Image: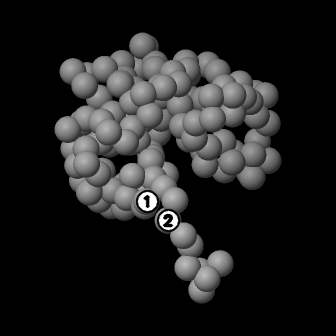
Amino acid sequence: MLVRDAMSTMVLTIGPAHTLRQAAALMSARRVGAAVVLDPDAGGLGILTERDILNSVGLGQNPDTERADAHTTTDVVFAAPTWTLEEAAAAMAHGGFRHLIVLDRDEPVGVVSVRDIIRCWAPARQRVPAAAR
């Protein structure tokens, strides 16, 4: 199975000046765990995840004044829609992250998460063994 079969095509894009609270509200409303941060001045794409917001709040920072650009990962590993899910999972495991921005012709066309991969690999109605409950 390929990344294009598993990825979410609803890409939430925010700007670097969004506050963490604004980003969290948008992510929550769209039920996504990551936002693509488009910074035309910096010339590239970054990613802001739920973990980035959680870490900031955990440090006591104010989500109403902290800006997305201060918490954005800019050395992003991008996936291609034609990658296999195994390639995406390996990149995530190697890099220690849970989301990949999917690019097609240098444009973000989706985001694939660990949850997306698990959903594809595990049968939807598979019964959970009693020992695992």
Instruction: Give the quarter of the image for residue 96.
Output: bottom left
Which of the labelled discs sits on residue 126, or is there none?
2
- Badge 2: how crowded within 10 Å, few (<14), some, or many (20+)? few
Furthest-top residue in view?
40
- In the rendering, at what x and y percent does residue 131 appear? 60, 86
- In the rendering, at what x and y percent does residue 26 appear? 66, 26
C-alpha span from label 1 to label 2: 5 Å
Determine whether, in the image, residue 74 is placed left or right of residue 91.
Answer: right
Q: Secondary structure at mark 1?
A: loop
Closer to the camera, 43 or 51?
51
Which of the labelled discs sits on residue 82, or is there none?
none
Which of the labelled discs sits on residue 123, or is there none?
1
At a point 79% along the width and 36% down the height, the residue shown is 62
Determine whether, in the image, residue 43 is placed left or right of residue 65.
Answer: left
Instruction: Give the quarter of the image for residue 29.
Output: top right
Does the CB distance between marks 1 and 2 fall below 8 Å?
yes
Q: Is residue 48 above or below residue 85?
A: above
Image quadrant holding the C terminus, namely: bottom right
- In the rendering, at what x and y percent does residue 52 appear? 60, 44
Picture mark count: 2
Residue 109 seen in the figure: yes
At a point 24% along the width and 53% down the height, the residue shown is 87
Residue 95 seen in the figure: no
Closer to the camera, 44 or 128?
128
Give the residue type that dot 2 points to.
Gln
